[in-house]
Image (cartoon, rainbow, N blue to C red):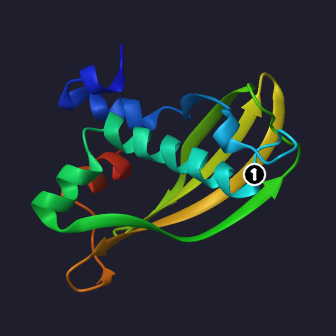
Amino acid sequence: MTPDALAVSDRASWAAAAEQKLSITVYYEDTDAGGVVYYANYLRFLERARTEWLRGLGFVQSTLLQQTGLAFAVRDLAVEFLRPARLDDRLTVTAAVADHGRAQVVFAQRIERGSELLLRARVRVVCLDLARGKPAAMPPALYEILRNRA
């Protein structure tokens, strides 16, 4: 079952799962001249996994922005690049909630090729009221899911 197919009552258990996984193939556009993934593109992969985590809870970022004026932005991150990914690699990108507050979520993330760990990251994402340009409490439904997770 895909996250999009989950009933609202099931979303909390989906969020409580240890981690969410996204499969990505490395394309030519992701690499440098040597066929190695360019370092900034790893951040794009991490972003996709967090976006799919949020979508799986029923929160589409474009809809959230239109309806509430809220958006999520990376405030800080720490990344360990352990091994390179290469052209045509199949990667698994994980996202797990490590901590959260009313206006922020901290994710523990990894990128793996099979059982080989390529990258480890800790990413703090804040909820912003874009009209004011300031942090804001995340939507109550999302906060409740996070607060009630096992």
Q: Is 75 placed above or below 30 here?
A: below
* Camera sees residue 149: no
Residue 120 x, y percent position in the rendering: 75, 49
Q: Residue 107: name its quadrant.
A: bottom right
Q: Nearer the viewer, residue 25 or 69?
A: 25
Residue 17 x, y percent position in the rendering: 49, 31
Q: Is 48 placed above or below 121 here?
A: above
Residue drawn at x 80%, y 37% as measured from the top left: 85
In the image: residue 105, left or right of residue 144: right
In the image: residue 136, left or right of residue 50: left
Label 1: few (<14), some or many (≥20) within 10 Å?
some
Q: Nearer the viewer, residue 41 or 133?
A: 41
Position of the C terminus by quadrant: top left
Which residue of the protein is positioned furthest toward the top in this rendering? Answer: 1
* Camera sees residue 83: yes
Identify which amino acid the numbered label 1 is placed on: Tyr
Which residue of the protein is positioned furthest toward the front in this rendering? Answer: 33
Q: Which of 113 and 145 is in front in this view?
A: 113
Residue 109 x, y percent position in the rendering: 64, 47
Residue drawn at x 23%, y 86% as measured from the top left: 132
Position of the N terminus by quadrant: top left
Numbered disc total: 1
Residue 47 x, y percent position in the rendering: 52, 50
Q: Residue tagged by mark 1?
A: 38
Residue drawn at x 71%, y 39% as measured from the top left: 111
Q: What element carries label 1?
A: loop
